[in-house]
Image (tube, helix red, strand yellow):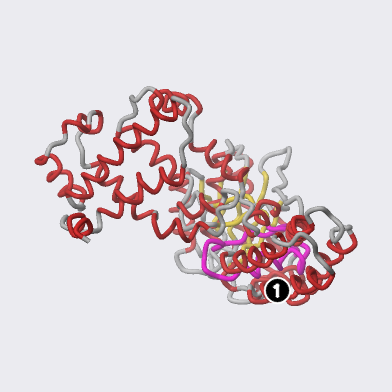
């Protein structure tokens, strides 16, 4: 979402960092570029004006012009201002000491509210909590069925009484059920609305009065830009809420809503949906998001994702195999699947410091379709072939290529590159340094892309 804004800001700040000394005129010029970048990203113009004034005051009033590395100090000022703009230290859900913790979800139709309920339930279940959801959206056709299906997928109990009963009565009944069954959390899915409707707002207020929620979360669609901010303002006036869940943050919108909404409404973003899958819901950390926008990476989130997917004992065993040349294609496949659980290649690369400008270059060489082809090739092998690739002859290569929908050349490339990777691990064990980018490009990019070419492509390329 922030690609264009990130590129503009990083370009402007890189120019400042390249200078050994800065003047007030240099700061003014940079702030004009920052202002234009934010306005093009659909950030509220009042927020932009206050933001640039804040950064300029920090830069000029903080002794930046006389600093040894003034450009770096300006980057630091922009990073701090961006962090504060999006909420500072961030926010978290209020957890009641007496179960159940009640979370009331509200939002417009089409914002992804019901799906957000399922994603939030999955997140809380992963934290060890028992979760129930109340199907109180009786306005939209199939909303109850959708919530029931989501409940089955994530392992949450769903309390529903169809679409004929009053949603207020359903919510109150569901709360009683959650208490009787000692559920840790009850998520109440309320009716979506096409606009801020007086009758539905009254219904929401009554559900809130009956259930006394510990958290009222407003679900807004990041793709709607400043309309999302306007909706949040209107909801705040009609029915006070505590925090925001922003959906579709992985889309191609310009990002203005995420940057503006806290400053305009005073309500923080607590969760962000970054994909269509049910596990694609992340805690929103303003400081980490500011780092991503400025190309500083997000190492903490990357570590958290890795810790969630990789078992420490398995990782140690895998490292031992790599260092002793016992690493097999079966091990490689296992590692590949674990990496893919962490997200797309672009999202992982985006969390690495200094990778901002290089992501597009890397995407041209390695993408998730390459990983699909590599996985298909390995899955088309027998267990014996994965354990000992040296037994794979011409006949076996033809069978593997046919089974994976790729080419014989692609299979040969993967086997060649895998053997080179094993040699690299031996070099690493002996203390020699390796370039991880080169490793990724050679192992995944070349082998994966080979699956999309006819088998004669390699010979034609060599003749040229």
Magenta-drawn segment: 240-269
Q: Identify the residue at image location x=9%, y=41%.
A: 395
**Along the viewing direction, whichever of 197 and 128 lies nearer the viewer:** 128
In the image, 251 versus 29, the foreground residue is 29
Q: Does the magenta stretch include residue 37?
A: no
Check disc 1 and report its element: helix, strand or loop. Answer: helix
Q: Mark 1 points at which residue?
A: 33
Task: Provide residue 159's location: percent of width, then percent of height.
Answer: 53, 50
Q: x%, y% of residue 376?
A: 26, 47
Compared across the picture, whether 35 is left or right of 253 comes to right
In percent of width and height, residue 13 lies at: 69, 63
Instruction: Answer with left or right where residue 172 lies relative to residue 435.
Output: right
Quick check: 262 above or below 89?
Answer: below
Q: In which quarter of the image is the C terminus?
A: bottom left
Q: Quadrant of the N terminus?
A: bottom right
User: Which of the 4 image quadrants contains residue 85?
Assistant: bottom right
């Amino acid at each position: 979402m922030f690609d264009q804004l990130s590129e503009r800001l990083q370009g402007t700040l890189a120019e400042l960092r390249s200078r050994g000394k800065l003047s007030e005129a240099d700061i003014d010029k940079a702030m004009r570029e920052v202002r234009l970048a934010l306005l093009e990203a659909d950030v509220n113009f009042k927020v932009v004006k206050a933001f640039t004034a804040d950064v300029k005051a920090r830069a000029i009033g903080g002794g930046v012009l006389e600093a040894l590395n003034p450009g770096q100090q300006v980057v630091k000022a922009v990073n701090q201002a961006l962090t504060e703009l999006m909420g500072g230290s961030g926010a978290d859900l209020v957890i009641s000491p007496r179960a159940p913790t009640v979370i009331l979800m509200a939002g417009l139709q089409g914002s992804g509210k019901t799906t957000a309920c399922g994603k939030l339930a999955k997140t809380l279940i992963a934290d060890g909590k028992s979760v129930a959801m109340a199907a109180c959206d009786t306005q939209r056709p199939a909303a109850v069925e959708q919530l029931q299906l989501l409940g089955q997928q994530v392992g949450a109990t769903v309390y529903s009484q169809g679409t004929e009963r009053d949603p207020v009565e359903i919510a109150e009944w569901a709360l009683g059920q959650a208490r009787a069954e000692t559920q840790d959390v009850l998520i109440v899915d309320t009716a979506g609305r096409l606009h801020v409707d007086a009758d539905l707002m009254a219904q929401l207020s009554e559900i809130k009065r009956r259930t006394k929620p510990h958290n009222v979360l407003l679900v807004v669609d990041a793709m709607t830009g400043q309309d999302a901010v306007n909706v949040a303002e209107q909801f705040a006036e009609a029915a006070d809420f505590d925090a925001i869940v922003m959906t579709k943050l992985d889309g191609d919108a310009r990002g203005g809503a995420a940057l503006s909404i806290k400053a305009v409404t005073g309500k923080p973003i607590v969760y962000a949906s970054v994909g269509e899958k049910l596990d694609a819901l992340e805690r929103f950390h303003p400081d980490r998001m500011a780092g991503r926008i400025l190309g500083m990476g997000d190492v903490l989130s990357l570590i958290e994702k890795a810790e969630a997917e990789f078992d420490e004992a398995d990782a140690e065993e895998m490292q031992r195999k790599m260092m002793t040349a016992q690493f097999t294609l079966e091990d490689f496949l296992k590692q590949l699947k674990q990496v893919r659980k962490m997200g797309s290649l672009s999202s992982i690369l985006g969390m690495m410091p200094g990778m901002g400008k290089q992501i597009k270059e890397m995407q041209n060489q390695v993408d998730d379709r390459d990983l699909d082809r590599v996985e298909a090739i390995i899955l088309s092998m027998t267990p014996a072939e994965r354990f000992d690739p040296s037994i794979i002859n011409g006949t076996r290569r033809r069978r593997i290529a046919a089974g994976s929908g790729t080419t014989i050349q692609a299979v040969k490339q993967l086997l060649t590159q895998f053997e080179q990777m094993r040699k690299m691990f031996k070099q690493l064990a002996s203390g020699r340094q390796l370039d991880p980018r080169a490793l990724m490009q050679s192992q995944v990019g070349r082998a994966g892309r080979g699956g999309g070419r006819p088998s004669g492509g390699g010979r034609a390329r060599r003749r040229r």
